[in-house]
Image (spheres, rainbow, N blue to C red):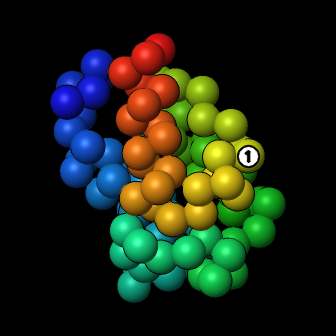
């Protein structure tokens, strides 16, 4: 459980939904790759803005590029929530 009352699974599900919306692909799942799904810098900014709004934490755009799957990004964001 993270400090904002969301489980790791819920966080991953949120990130998947944000990826689906930003990339316009409802078939994406937790293991989908941002780049293979056609992700670009605009989509990365949309993803981080949505996550920052939903979670109230800073999510640098560089994280989307460094951790391109929703499950990996959620893991890093979860660590940030626990530390922050």
Left or right: where 31 falls relative to 22: left
Left or right: where 65 falls relative to 10: right
Left or right: where 46 falls relative to 53: right
Q: Where is residue 38 drawn, in percent x and y?
A: 68, 81
Above or below 8: residue 14 = below
Above or below 57: residue 35 = below
Q: Is residue 10 visible?
A: yes
**Residue depicted at x 56% and y 75%:** 33
Near mark 1 (Cα within 10 A), the count class, few <14, some 14-19 or many ≥20, is: few
**Residue depicted at x 41% and y 45%:** 75
Left or right: where 4 falls relative to 66: left
Above or below 51: residue 65 = below
Q: Is residue 55 visible?
A: no
Farthest residue in the right direction?
Answer: 41
Q: Where is residue 31 drawn, in percent x and y?
A: 41, 73
Q: Quadrant of the N terminus?
A: top left
**Residue depicted at x 60% and y 35%:** 59
Secondary structure, mark 1, is helix
Above or below 41: residue 50 = above
Label 1 sits on residue: 62
**Residue depicted at x 37% and y 68%:** 30
Quadrant of the image occupied by residue 71: bottom left
């Amino acid at each position: 459980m993270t400090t904002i009352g969301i489980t790791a699974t819920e966080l991953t599900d949120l990130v998947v939904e944000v990826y689906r919306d930003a990339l316009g692909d409802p078939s994406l799942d937790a293991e989908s790759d941002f780049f293979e799904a056609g992700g670009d810098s605009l989509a990365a900014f949309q993803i981080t803005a949505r996550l920052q709004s939903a979670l109230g934490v800073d999510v640098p755009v560089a994280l989307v590029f460094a951790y391109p799957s929703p499950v990996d990004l959620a893991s890093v964001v979860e660590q940030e929530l626990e530390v922050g």
